[in-house]
Amino acid sequence: MEHVKKVKRVKSVKRINQFLKWIKGYKLIFLISTILLIALQYFRTLSPLFIAHIIDAELDGLKSPLPTFMTSLFTGDTVKERLAIIALVYVSFTLFRVVIMFGRRMINAFFTESVAYHMRNTLYKKLQDLSFSYHTHAETGDLIQRCTTDVETYRVFVGEQLIEIFRLVFLIALTIYQMAKLNGVMTIYSVLITPVIFLTAFIYFKWVKKIFKRVEEAEAKMTTTLQESVTGIRVVKAFAKEKYEIEKFDADSKDYMKEDFHLLKLMAIYWGGTDVITFFQYAITIAAGIVLASTQDLTTGEYIAFLSYIGMIVWPLRQLGRIVQDFGKTTVALDRLDEIMLKESEHDGDSENHPPIKGGVEFRNVGFQFEDDNKPLLKGISFKVEPGESLAIVGKTGSGKSTLINLMIRLLDNQEGSILFDGVDIKDINKKHLRENVGIIMQEPFLYSRTLYDNIGIMDQNASEEKVYKAATIAALHEDILGFEGGYKTIVGERGVTLSGGQKQRVAIARMLLDSKPVLIFDDSLSAVDTETDIQIRRALSDYWKDTTVFIITHRITTAMEADKIIVLDKGDIVEMGTHKELLNQDGLYSELWDIQTNVEYDYKQTVKGVK
Ligand SMILES: Nc1ncnc2c1ncn2[C@@H]1O[C@H](COP(=O)(O)OP(=O)(O)OP(=O)(O)O)[C@@H](O)[C@H]1O
Ligand SMILES: [Mg+2]
């Protein structure tokens, strides 16, 4: 039993920390806001006492319930004069309250907006820092929802409701204090069944939290479906799968509706239920007041003040129930944010070593297996490339060529063996430094929805126009770009032109030309370009990158043959290694590919000639 209690306590400490960590840098401003709030609540509980004072002290000649710093202001010889002053004080007092209230709201607005701003940026940075494998498994729609809806849920909670908890708790406490000062017995009657409201809120909170989680999950699922089908709309249309997509979205949307409906039903029960309890509390207070007043135990002024005070307790309590309900929602949102924040960043424990990288690369017995795979994808991979050399990697689709590259820049980590850059194990090289020294032209390059110029210039924002044009020319792209109406200012992607696969690949190559790197990797990056253009580009590039170590992954033997060294990957192993000539003589996979491809090229050329 002790143990269970301890676990629970640890859990709630964790919760509080989880809650407060986002407002850490804003404690002072939060404190000021809270102090102003407490003062405001105290002023509020003084309000009903003005009427009690008028009735009891001025008219009936009894003791005043107002604090002396107030009553000392009420000078005057006649009741009339004093009433005028009381009215004046009351009006000034109310104005003063309004000014403080405004100030507090402004401070609070600044506080919440700053918190949300800080939160969004922290999350964004974390997303950038998370590993490649995290992102290959994370769902985009879900991540976006976490960074927007979940942040908003927290912002609303700390900005409007956390402070509201303080406000209500202080209001209730100060109200009870003022009531107790007026009349002890009557106070007991006035709060008699309020604990039931608390209890109801508590039970409801436990219940509703699970349902909130389900609602959030259903919403995330719906967002993901929406995001996927919109992104893939071309495929959807090309395969005439609109009906299927609509049905899928409809199912997700229905699930979301069901969960939300369930939640609304529970809310209706809660509000209705607490309404009844509130009604009973009013009834008890009214009845007790009449009885006590009839036996002279309660003055008229006090009775009126009590009727005011009861509202100051019961309404906040119900409000508290609602906040508790939002607290449930917020803890779910925070848990979801923590799922991102507590993930290990790929830079945690990273080496601080920045050795010079000249371009010598060596694989020593490298083995790699994906976590969700049952057998290794690569095993015992060993080869060595000297600075300035070129290496072609050939192999069937799915043989692990791109994976091998991902290992080289530590987007993935090999479980066996080691990879060395100029004799230094990459695990002892700072990741950022490593990646800055290796240029990759990806198999499926990603272009931003910006101008073509910006897309090329992304590698070097300070590059001169000439340099950008020259890069585009080497990549055999300049003519294509001038062919567009907007030239280099043409917007690419969703808001602009759709580039062909080959054009995209050439943008990716032009990008790389702006920045010189000791190691360059072409992951099938000219696959969508015709053979002639491929050769033309590569000729231009080989002059440009004379001293660069170049890795070329390709399915085209005519491309591979020009490399200093060629390796052939099959079933996780290097099955052949050598120069073009050596491999042709080996009668293996390479020469087989050579035969197929040269025959095809030959046939193709004959056909073209024939047609001409
Ligand atoms: N994140 C992952 N989790 C599990 N398996 C993966 C993951 N990424 C890739 N694979 C698998 O690893 C294998 C090798 O993939 P890889 O992309 O390295 O092949 P490739 O040789 O580059 O092929 P291609 O020539 O088609 O580009 C494939 O079977 C692929 O399905
Ligand atoms: Mg690949």
Image (cartoon, grey):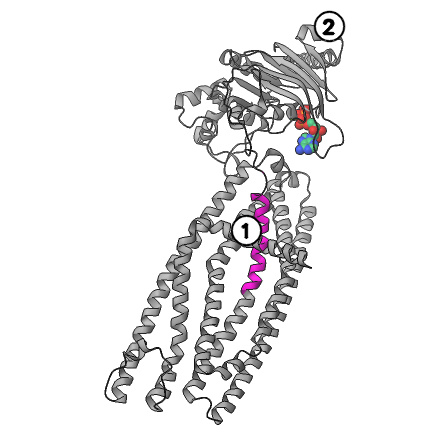
Is 610 covered by the magenta stretch? no
Residue 498 at x, y = what percent?
54, 33
Task: Label 2, secondary structure: give it.
Answer: helix
Q: Amino acid at mark 1?
A: Gln
Whether 433 is drawn above or below 181: the answer is above
Mark toward the start of the polypeptide (1 vs 2)? 1
What's the distance in space between the residues labelled 1 and 2, CA to CA?
A: 66 Å
Q: Who is closer to the viewer here, 208 or 449?
A: 208
Residue 133 at x, y = what percent?
63, 34
Residue 103 at x, y = what percent?
35, 61
Q: Quadrant of ligand 1?
A: top right
In the visual, does 525 lie left or right of 173?
A: right
Quadrant of the image for the N terminus? Answer: bottom right
Residue 598 at x, y = what percent?
69, 12
Residue to which mark 2 is pinned: 585
Whether 485 is drawn above or below 306: the answer is above
Tags 1 and 2 in contact by the CB under 8 Å rule? no
Residue to which mark 1 is pinned: 18
**Label 1 CB-ligand 1 distance < 8 A:** no
Which secondary structure class fits the magenta region best? helix
Q: Who is closer to the viewer here, 427 or 269?
A: 427
- The quarter holding residue 110 reads bottom left
Is 341 covered by the magenta stretch? yes
Q: Residue at x 27, y 85 (%)?
A: 82
Q: Mark 1 or mark 2, which is nearer to you?
A: 1
**Label 2 CB-ligand 1 distance < 8 A:** no
In the visual, does 470 lie left or right of 387?
A: left
Q: Amino acid at mark 2?
A: Asn
Whether 491 is drawn above or below 404: the answer is below
The range drawn in magenta is 323-344
What crowding class fits label 1: few (fewer than 14 Cα within 10 Å), some (14-19), or many (20 or more)? some
